[in-house]
Image (spheres, rainbow, N blue to C red):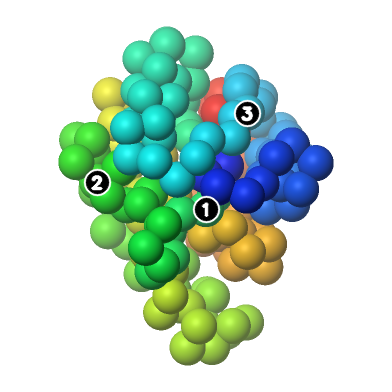
């Protein structure tokens, strides 16, 4: 679980806590958790360390997917993707629209595969983050059907 923020720390990382609870609550192993600044090279470095570790099957990021000047998660992650999972963003926006309306347009949520590791980049506000962690997740991602080791 990777929180991307210039302002959050372990105590104030509410979205990271929500996603970590969802991951472990679904029976997955939380292999790692970190917080990095909104910086392309810092984000890439942490993600690459996890995708090449051999210990992580999936990474969930929270933060940096908005449209402000500091939000750089898509710019950091997209060039690293071996494959993009287009449907994640579509489903995320469909589900998110039901709770936040047109505000969903401010998110650039994305997903894909890097070095054989799934990555899901979610917004930081707790409500959309929780939406991404539950209603946007494929049924096959539950521990009962396909155990995974997540890095958060």
Q: Earlier in the sequence, mark 3 or mark 1?
A: 3
Residue at the extreme bottom of the image, as rendered? 102
Mark 3–mark 2 Cα distance, whole angstroms, equals 21 Å
Instruction: Name the residue at 61% across, 20% down.
Output: 31
Residue 121 makes an appearance in the image? yes
Label tally:
3
Which label belongs to residue 63? Answer: 1
In the picture provided, is 145 more to the left or to the right than 26?
Answer: left
User: Residue 42, how many percent across, how many down?
Assistant: 40, 31
- Crowd tier of the residue under label 1, counting other residues whose Cα lies within 10 Å: few below 14, some 14–19, many 20 or above: many
Whether 54 is drawn above or below 110: the answer is: above
Question: Furthest-top residue in view?
Answer: 54
Q: Which image quadrant for residue 152?
A: top right
In this view, 150 is above or below 91: above
Residue 119 in the image, given as x and y percentages of width and height: 40, 39
**Location of mark 3 (residue):** 33
Left or right of 115, for residue 53? right
Q: Which mark is residue 78?
A: 2
Query: Which sits earlier in the primary sequence, circle 3 or circle 2?
Result: 3
């Amino acid at each position: 679980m990777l929180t991307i923020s210039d302002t959050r720390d372990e105590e104030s990382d509410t979205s990271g806590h929500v996603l970590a609870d969802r991951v472990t609550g679904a029976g997955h192993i939380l292999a790692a958790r970190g917080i990095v600044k909104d910086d392309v090279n810092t984000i890439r470095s942490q993600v690459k360390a996890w995708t090449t570790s051999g210990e992580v099957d999936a990474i969930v990021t929270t933060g940096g997917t908005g449209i402000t000047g500091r939000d750089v998660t898509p710019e950091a992650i997209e060039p690293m993707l071996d494959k993009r999972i287009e449907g994640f963003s579509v489903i995320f926006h469909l589900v998110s629209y039901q709770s936040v309306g047109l505000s969903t347009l401010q998110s650039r949520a994305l997903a894909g595969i890097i070095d054989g590791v799934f990555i899901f980049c979610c917004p930081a506000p707790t409500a959309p983050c929780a939406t991404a962690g539950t209603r946007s997740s494929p049924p096959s991602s539950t521990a009962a059907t396909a155990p995974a080791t997540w890095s958060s």
